[in-house]
Image (tube, rainbow, N blue to C red):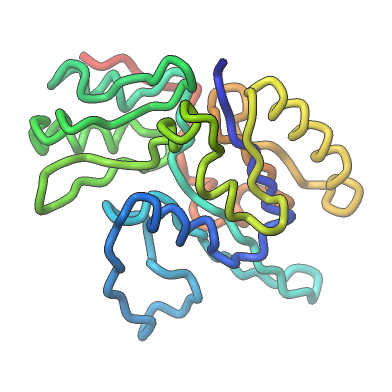
Amino acid sequence: MSKAFFIDTSRCTACRGCQVACKEWQGFPANFTKQLGWGSHQNPPDLNCYNYKVVRFSEHKINNRVLWNFFPDQCRHCLEPPCKAAADHYVKNAVVIDEPTGAVVFTERTKKIPNEGFLSMKEYCPYNIPRRNPETGVINKCDLCFERIEAGHIPMCVKTCPTGAMNFGERGAMLSLARSRLATVKAEFPDASLLDEDSVRIIYLITLKREEYHDLASLKNPVLTRSIG
């Protein structure tokens, strides 16, 4: 019953409904941020312990056309999560895999992981996802709404999305949908591609080259994970 998301960024309008719905479901407080000097409509500027999802903004001028690339960033729930291997080196079962869904879940036991262990988790994560709550010490991130899924509901971000950018279901079905949609999108955007679909449960379709999206080009290849010694 391995589950997956298919996130079609060609249909994302950056309404940030998914971002807000996630915060509300988790019961997280607001972030106190300022736009001055930031130069972007993206808010907050990055993922944090109170934002499991952030819609990233990238603006480009290509062939005299201004393009806004929106990217709802979150944990990819890797099929072989390196964050779990790093965490297990310090505290066993601080990071667990939810068997019915395949979700990679950070538990309360992560507060026992020392700071060097947290930094190791961040280093080994291909997508720079783990964040630590400075007050509680808990390391957290998206949990795939696994409790909602097991209760027969869909994740909150998917339920909220008004454009069809967020899709959820069995991983095989999501891969099929993603590949079908990619073939359609390529007619308008020849550089469109799927991101790391063979190694993650959160499958993205992007319309332009990877380097045209925030820092995607600099992120590590998730297939090339190293052993934790």
The quarter in which the N terminus is drawn is top right
| Vertical side of 46 occupied by 178: above or below | above
Residue 25 located left or right of residue 178:
left
Query: Which of 175/194 is in front?
Result: 175
Q: Position of residue 73 (x, y in %)?
A: 49, 50
Query: Which of 75/167 is in front?
Result: 167
| Vertical side of 80 occupied by 120: above or below | below
Q: Residue furthest front?
A: 151
| Residue at the spot 52% in from the left edge and 41% down from the top edge | 155
Query: Which of 227/30 is in front?
Result: 30
Residue 31 located left or right of residue 42:
left
Q: Position of residue 140 (x, y in %)?
A: 27, 41
| Residue at the spot 39% in from the left edge and 36% down from the top edge | 143
| Residue at the spot 51% in from the left edge and 47% down from the top edge | 156
Q: Position of residue 152 (x, y in %)?
A: 54, 30
Q: How many marks?
A: 0
| Vertical side of 129 occupied by 161: above or below | below
Q: Quadrant of residue 114?
A: top left
| Residue at the spot 20% in from the left edge and 38% down from the top edge | 119
Q: Position of residue 125 (x, y in %)?
A: 36, 33
The quarter in which the C terminus is drawn is top left
Q: Residue furthest right?
A: 187
